Image (spheres, rainbow, N blue to C red):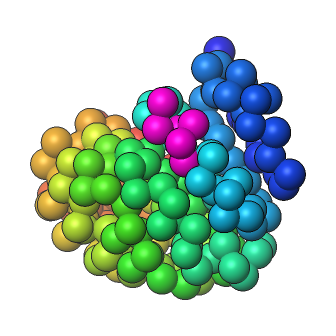
Amino acid sequence: MGSVVEVRSPVDVAQLRARLGNADVVQFQEPLTEAEYRSMAALLGDHPMVPLRVYGFNDDLATLRFLRWFPHARRFSVASLWHLTDLTPLDQLSADVEFLDIGETRKPLDLAPVAQFRRLRRLRVVEHRRGLPELLHANPGLRDLSLWRLAADNSCPSLSCHTCRHWR
C-alpha cells in the first residue's frame, strides 16, 4: 500500500522524488513558490498515476491559479478546499484528465465547467448536484462513480444502482 505525501514549503525535491514511487496521493494545503510548483509538476510528470490533491482553508489556493503549473495532471482532487467557489479554472488541466475528485466546499458548486472533460474514468462528487447529469452524459466511459451526500435517484436517474456507489 502506498502513502500520502504532504508537500510543504520549503520543498525538498530529492525527498519528494524518493517518496513519489510509493505514493497514493501528493497533497498540499498552503501555497508554494513558483519554483516549488514547477519542481513538483516536473516530478509528477514522471508519475502520472499519482493524483494531485489540494485542500484546506487557503483563499489563494481556492482560486486554483496554481494549476497553470500542472497542465498535464491527469488525476486531480479538490477535496475539502473550503473556499473554492468556481470550477472554471480546471480548464487549465489537460483534456486527458481521467480522475477528478470534487469534494467538500463551503457551498455546493456548479459542475458545468467540469463537463469539458470527456475522458473521465473515475469521478467522486460530494454534495455538488448542479450540472451533474451533463457531466455524467459527457463521460460515457466512466468506470468508477462515487456520489457522497447525494441521492443517486434524484441526481442521476438514468444510472442503474449498480453503476454508482452511493453514500448519504
Identify the residue shown where x is 32% and y is 50%.
97
Residue farthest to the top, as pictured: 1
Q: Position of residue 12 (x, y in %)?
A: 81, 39
Question: Which residues are drawn in magenta?
Answer: 41-46
Residue farthest to the right, as pictured: 10
The front one of 3 and 37 is 37
Identify the residue shown where x is 15% and y is 61%.
137
Q: Is residue 93 left or right of residue 119?
A: right
Q: Is residue 128 left or right of residue 155?
A: right
User: In this orientation, does residue 56 appear?
Assistant: no
- Dominant secondary-structure state across the stretch colored magenta: helix
Residue 44: say if magenta: yes
Count of labels shown? 0
Vertical relation: 86 (above or below) 143: below
Q: Quadrant of the N terminus?
A: top right
Q: Position of residue 53 (x, y in %)?
A: 61, 51
Q: Quadrant of the C terminus?
A: bottom right
Vertical relation: 57 (above or below) 118: below
Identify the residue shown where x is 32% and y is 44%.
98
